[in-house]
Image: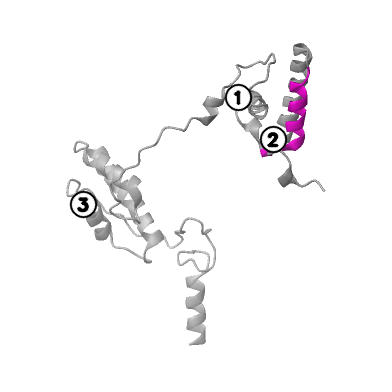
């Protein structure tokens, strides 16, 4: 019996073994014009077998690149795109440097810290005041996702000052207002309205358990 483990390794598994065999057969054709014609037909088959590649703007170019990869980069054909080199596919991407500074408050994340620093560097004006208010509202939302059911605005204001190292203070006339009773706060990966979510405004989760407790009492 012929097992896959005994066969030649698939170079690009998403196209299957038949495409790999077809490209090997195309390479064996002596006439270049006929070879080019057959490879164009194989590339069309590859596009059918891997339809998600059509989501890319340059998907035709990618298909031809994949054909060259499967063919071992030695396809002598007339192609509509320049032939890629093996080095292009073996090059490692540039290393993306990540900030080494730890996040001060995990419930807010690094993006909020970056926003705080940007706002702190602005000159004092009405726009900065409104930015602080909107930032505080967003921070309260993030706080409620990961912590308890309610939080005083003074806590959020103190966090803004702490995360900015004292460079940003909330004006005294800025207030967040009350949280809507219909507000829903769900952690990432937990759908709004699922049972067990204490912020469900539709009667699920914690609110439902409270009603059962009162009835049983």
Secondary structure mainly formed by the magenta segment: helix
Q: Residue furthest left?
A: 166
Q: Residues within 10 Å of mark 3 (few under 14, many from 20)?
A: some
Q: How is the image coloured?
A: one colour
Between residue 77 and residue 52, name the one nearer to us: 77
Q: Nearer the viewer, residue 1 or 201?
A: 1
Which residue is at 82% across, 48% downward? 1
Q: Nearer the viewer, residue 182 or 188?
A: 188
For disc 2, the marked residue is: 50
Residue that numbered label 3 is attached to: 161
> Is the residue marked by circle 2 packed among few (<14), some (14-19), or many (20+) residues within 10 Å?
few
Q: Nearer the viewer, residue 85 or 62?
A: 85
Task: Please give the range of residues in magenta.
Answer: 13-29
Cα–Cα gap, marks 2 and 3: 53 Å
Disc on the earlier residue, 1 or 3: 1
Q: Residue furthest bottom?
A: 217
27 part of magenta stretch: yes
Residue 38, given in percent of the width and then of the height, sits at: 78, 20
Residue tagged by mark 1?
58
Q: Is residue 168 left or right of residue 7?
A: left
User: Label 1 near label 2: C-beta < 8 Å?
Assistant: no
Residue at (35, 65) in percent of width and height: 150
Q: Quadrant of residue 179?
A: bottom left
């Amino acid at each position: 019996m012929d097992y896959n483990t005994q066969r030649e390794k698939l170079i690009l598994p998403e196209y299957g073994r038949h495409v790999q065999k077809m490209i090997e057969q195309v390479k064996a054709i002596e006439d270049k014009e006929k070879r080019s014609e057959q490879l164009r037909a194989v590339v069309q088959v590859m596009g059918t077998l891997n339809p998600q590649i059509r989501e890319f703007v340059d998907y035709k170019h990618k298909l031809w690149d994949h054909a060259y990869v499967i063919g071992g980069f030695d396809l002598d054909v007339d192609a509509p795109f320049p032939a890629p080199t093996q080095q292009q596919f073996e090059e490692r991407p540039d290393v993306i440097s990540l900030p080494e500074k730890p996040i001060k408050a995990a419930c807010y994340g690094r993006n909020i810290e970056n926003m705080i620093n940007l706002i702190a560097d602005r000159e004092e004006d009405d726009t900065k005041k409104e930015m602080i208010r909107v930032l505080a509202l967003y921070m309260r939302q993030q706080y409620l996702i990961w912590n308890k059911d309610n939080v005083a605005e003074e806590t959020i204001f103190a966090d803004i000052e702490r995360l900015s190292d004292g460079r940003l203070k909330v004006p005294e006339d800025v207030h967040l207002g009350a949280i809507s009773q219909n507000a829903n706060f769900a952690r990432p990966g937990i759908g709004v309205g699922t049972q067990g979510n204490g912020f469900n405004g539709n009667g699920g989760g914690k609110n439902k358990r409270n009603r059962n407790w009162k009835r049983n009492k």
